[in-house]
Structure formats: structure tokens, C-alpha cells
Amino acid sequence: MLRTFAFAILTVLFAGLGTTPLRAAEFHTIRSTKIYSGDSLDVARSFLQEHTGQYDLQTVDLVHRNTLARGDYRTVRFVQKYDGLAVLGTAAVVRVSPAARVTVAAFQVSRDLTVSTTPYVGRFEVRTLLYSLVGPWAANGPLGFELAVLPEDSGPGRLVWKVDVRTGLGGLRCLVDAHRGVVLQLRRLAVESLGRVYPISSVVTPNATDLELVDLDDASPLKLTGWDGQFFVTNYVSGGGQAEIVAEQTLTTTDGTDFLYDPPTDPTDATDGFAQVGLYYHLTRIRDFFADNHGVDFSLPAYSLTAVANAMDNGQPMDNAYFSEQGMGAPWNTNNLIAIGQGPTLDFADDSDVFLHEFTHYVSYVAVGYNMGQMGVNTYGLSPHSGSLDEGLADYFACTVNGDPTLGEASLGLLSGGARDLTDTSKVCPDDIFGEVHMDGELIGSVSWTLYETFGKANSDQLLWGALTLLMPYASFGEFSQALVQTAGEMVTGGDLVAADVQTLQGILDARGLSDCFAELPIVPGEPRNIKLFGLDTMAMMMGTTCLGARDYGLELSSLFHFRATPEPDHEGVRLSVEMTPQGGANLLWKVYARVGEHVAFSTGGFPAVFAYDYQTVWFDSTVGELVIDDTSDPPFDPSQTYHFVLVHQNCPIADAVVSVEPSPAMAEPDAGVDSGVVDASVSADASGPVDDGGNKGCSCRSASSGSARGGGALVLGLVLLVLGLIRRRRRLP
């Protein structure tokens, strides 16, 4: 069933290829001493109006989203609208100092929108399409429909139906072209992820204690409803998978006043009141942390929340927990959902780390909305980095609230020894970035805890919250580093840190590779870069096929990072070298794309595929390869230009790759027929002959004119990672 579902989606989504998203975020540190009048929103609007021409915002309609506090500073966030419709994946940020000065302006906007906002495809056609694609989940309940605009890197944009499908595992979001009637994107909405309670967890604080439940709403009978009608704790009844979760709220007090339920004698009890009381207590505890320390206003309707205890998957135990923006329907009608799983051997409700982690996802989504998830796609192709940031920050805030750097002692730790240790500083970027958001988030969590140990809890909490509020959709690790340094500078101005602390922070970020860990990595002679490439073997197995079957279907994966090389004026060429080390097995098939002056661009009107490039090489069963660009290349080498590269592959095994660049002298004779895989980029497409898709050793080399819209094969990673996420949810806190 999994294979049928997966490849049915692929068939539909191939129809959508051919459009690219908006460019990466623009971050500007403002040095002006100008003082504005009015409140922070007035200051931000005045600044934007004054600098409309400088930032090319004449055609950009920015609408206030919210204003967030970081100490005495205010971060004013805007979203882009076009003809009254939301432009997906856009944001603008203006940070205002206590003295009414602007310290930061950041933009991720689309400036060339001209698409018609009249849909040619109606809701009935969309529902029919989704029914054929994802089955009865699209028909057995209410769908959330919203017209929106999907931006392009340079182009009119696309009018889309943003459709949220309620399912039992957090929901799906589908983007359907409202003019052509094809599905463009599909992703999960879930972010994998006085009562008697465990103060922390059944492992850290194993004695159940009677503690005050604050902000319960007065009612008769008293139930676990609070925050002036904003928060409901319920218990799972049924649903999961393709069926929406059904929950109930029947728990009342043990004595008319208190909820003094003992821990169940059977840890697999799926109805215990103890779990429900724990949810109310701990989620209220972390709510107070964000409200008191960071000024988050949970009275706003956007923050309405239902929590489900003892959550299961169609009645089967679930070793998982998650936050989902799908919310819950009647009678609660809330915008957000946190589900805490009842597993086959333990209850995730025994571990408050789980609650606090998921709550941070909820806050970051409602307050900022930068996390585009495991399947985020932008002009660089697959971009899961914002999801990794959100996982690492969720780990940090859970641990800082609980005062303990180990996350999940009573959940992940008991399942497989998988509790996350934030004091482990072994991971660096890019060497240890794998492409799975929880694994990569460990780097962010541990760096954050290093700040906790270096600057103390109060300062690190402010540093990390301040950085989080500056993040844009699709944020990279490098942008997070940039935001941390900016916030640290503001804290020096405010007297919380001293100038030397900024240098200390920079040293921590440099040591972990975060300072230049953007979507594109600079690469210089003598300093190779180490990256990891996920293999098709694992993904194909999850989809019920083989690596060769996935290849036949056109499945391609890209490196998570692009590379950028800037020659010296006296260089006569550039040589990019790649050394692959498969982790078991062989069967390699990979390419290098290169472009002059701008990064290799990917389309995203479906799953991402290479869209614009100048040079391409193909390698069969080779662990080494070189791409040489010199004066015989087409276009010829120009030392005044910057050269950009990316790896795209169909390797069966996971592989480590070492990427290096060196200056290269011009070559008199092209050499394209070497078994070791050496390619001269000056070989034309006609000279190199057709690509041998049979897996023979050797290479093929092609050139494309700059900016050409040639597909590099469908990079259908979005669905694969959807499947990967569904599999991994059994062992991860999303």
C-alpha cells in the first residue's frame, strides 16, 4: 500500500515542474542613528516607507503579522500580500531598539508578481483531485481551503489552493495550482515531535507530587480547561493514519477541587487521568516561561490549543509526540494541536521534556513561522535546515526550562538509549549535516546549550529567543548564526553582555562551523569541504521498491549544500574535485552542475529539479571526479566571475563526499574518456555523446546556456522525505 500511495503522488507531481521560488533572505544590519517617533510598529512602518526604493519594495505589499519582545527590543514581523492573498514563504522583519532606532531589516519577498488571482479550478475539482491522490482522507471531513500565491524566483508566481487535510497524524497540506489543476507540493503539518504529576519525569523526578494547576477556568464540574478558554486537555478515543483524531474531555476532579490521580499501575493504560493532568501542568508551566520571559501573548486567538493525552494510531500504540497546526475541530475549535503518544511499553506523558519540546514548536510556529519542515523547497532545492533549527531550539527550550541538558530520559532514553545529550559538542557544519531534521538539530541544540553554559541561563534564553524572532522561512544555520551575533550586540548595548562576549560567541559559532553554514558554502584552494549524501537504498526500501527501481522512476537527490568558488585574477581555470566514499556497497551515479555568477537554480512547481546551470557532468560507478572549467569551456573561464556548484545523485548507498577546488591551467586537449571519471567541462554536449543510462563506468559532460530552463531530472525528494518522516515518527520527537 505504501508503494502505491507514494508513486501515485509522484506521477501527479511530475506535471508541476518548471517554476522556481523566491530568493534567499536579505539581512541588513542598520547603522543609522536616526530616532523615529511612535510605537515599534509606527517605527517599522516609517522605516520601510522611507527605504522603499533602497530595498526595492515598490511592488511589495507588507501587512503587519505581529510584534515580539526580546527584552526592551521589539521585533516587528510582516507578511507579504498580493491582491489581498498571502504570498507563501515570505516575511519581512524590522527590529526596533528601546530608543526607537532600527537595528535590523530583513526581507524574503517576491517583487515580480503579476499572476491573475482568479481561480480556474474550483473547490470541487480540487477535492476530486486530492481524493484520487491521497484517498478518502480528502473527502471524509472538512478541508481547509485558502487561495494563496506561490512565488517564483523571477516570474509572475502561481495562484494556488492551500488545502489542509485533517488526518490522525497531524494533517497534510497540499498546494494545488488554481489555474492548471495539478498538485505542486505536499507536506505533513505535524512537527515531529493542583494535580499529581512528575515534576520533570518518571526518571529524573520519580516521585509523583501534588502541585498547583494554575489558570484553570471556573466551571462545574471542573475540567482541564484553562487560559480563559484557550487551552483544552483531552484524551484520545480513536483515529489516526487516514482518520482524524477523535478525543474526549471527561476527566473531572477526584474530590471536587483537585485532580489527584496516581500514576497508573499499567504503563500502557491509554485512559489514565495522570497523563492528562501532567499535560495541563507542564504545558502551563512552559506557557508561563514564554509569557514572563519573552512577552508572548497567549490570549490571542492564534494561540488556541488542544492537547491530546494517550494518543494512538488507529488504536495502536504510538511511540511519538507531535505538534500540528491542523488544530482540533468541534467542540474545541482550536488552531493548534499537541498530541502525546501512548506507546507499547511506556507513556510519553511520563516525560515533560516531550511536552516542552512540542510546545516550543507551537510557539515558534504561531509567533514566527520560519520552519518550512523536512520537505522545505526553495531555489537551492531541498532545504530542511529551518526544520533542523526548530528541532534544535525545541530541544534547548525544553532543557532550559527543566534545567537539564539531557532531553528525553523517560521516553527516548528508555526506548533505545536515544536521549539527546546537549553537552555533546562533536557535531560541526557541514561535515555532520545529514538531511534529517532531528539528527541535524542536535548540532543546534548543543551549540545552544554551550551558550547556556557560557553566558548563563538568563542571557542564553534571551540570545536564542532574540535570534529565533529574526528568522525567515527556509532559514539556514548561517542565518541563525547571523541572528545570534546581532542579538548579542543589542544585549551589549543594553548592558546584559560586554563586548568581549560577542567575540566569545563568534568563537563558539566558528568552532562549530555555523558562521558560514549557509545554503551555499564558500570553498577555497587547500580547504576541502566534507558533506554527506543520503542514499537511495534506504529511501527506496521505505517506498517498497529498490534503488534501481527508484532510479528508473527518476528519483534524484541533491547535496544539502551548494558551493561557491571565487578565482584569483591570474587564474586560468578552476578545477572542482569530488571524492566519494560509499558506506557499504557501490553502484554510484552522480552529477555535478555548475553555473557562472549565480547559484545553480532549482524549480519547485512540484518536486525540485535543476532549472538553470551552465555546465553538467555525469559519473557512473566512479568514486572520484573532476570538473575543469577553462578557456576552452562553453562559456569560457572568466577569472572575474564566481563559480557555483552542486552535486545531484542517484547513489544507492549513503556516501561521504570530499569537495575541493583548485586553480587549473588552461588545457590544450579536452579529455572526456577516462574511466577514473575525470571530466573536462570544455567538452561539448555533441562531443561527449549521449548519457549511458545503463550504469557503465565513465562520464558524460554537457553544457547549457546561462539561465536555461533545462531540467536536471526530477528531484522528487519531497515525497520520499514525507515517507521518511512517517517512518521516523516512531522514534523521534518531531
Image (cartoon, rainbow, N blue to C red):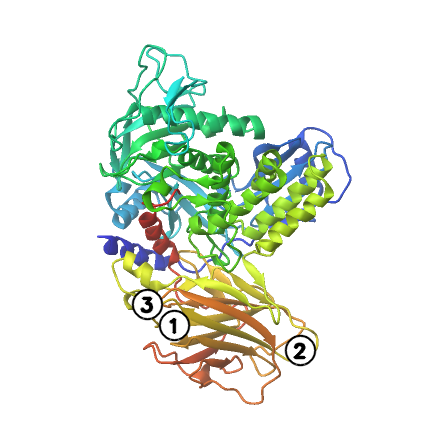
Residue 184 on image: x %, y %: 39, 52
Dot 3 corresponds to which residue? 551
For mark 3, does the 10 Å Cα neighbourhood hold few (<14), some (14 to 19), or many (20 or more) residues?
some
Task: Indicate whether 137 appears above or below 555.
Answer: above
Q: Which of marks 3 and 1 is in front?
A: 1
Residue 232's spot in the image, x, y percent?
Answer: 37, 24
Residue 355 against residue 188 in the figure, above or below: above
The quadrant holding residue 567 is bottom right
Q: Which residue is drawn at 45% across and 38% down?
A: 361
Task: From the viewer's side, name the closer residue of 415 and 607.
Answer: 415
First in sequence: mark 3 vs mark 1: 3
| As drawn, 13 above or below 483 | below
Q: Position of residue 614 (x, y in %)?
A: 53, 72
Q: Which amino acid does label 3 sit on?
A: Arg
Q: Do tag 1 and tag 2 residues touch (Cβ < 8 Å)?
A: no
Reply above or below: 31 against 689: above
Q: Estimate the spatial distance between the alpha carbons at disc 3 and disc 1, rounded to whole Å.
A: 10 Å
Residue 159 or residue 100, whichever sits in front: 100
How many residues crowd around disc 1 within 10 Å: few (fewer than 14), some, or many (20 or more)?
Answer: many
Q: How far apart are marks 1 and 2 (CA)?
A: 31 Å
Q: Earlier in the sequence, mark 1 or mark 2?
A: 2
- Residue 56 visible? The answer is no
Q: Name the residue type under label 2.
A: His
Q: Which residue is drawn at 48% across and 81% down?
A: 678
- Name the residue: 29% across, 56% down: 542
Give the numbered dot on residue 589: 1
Residue at horizontal 56 percent and vertical 68 percent from the top: 528
The x and y percentages for residue 490 are 69, 39
Residue placed under numbered mark 2 in the picture: 571
> How many residues crowd around disc 2 within 10 Å: few (fewer than 14), some, or many (20 or more)?
some
Residue ranking furthest to the bottom: 669
Q: Is mark 2 on a helix, strand or loop?
A: loop
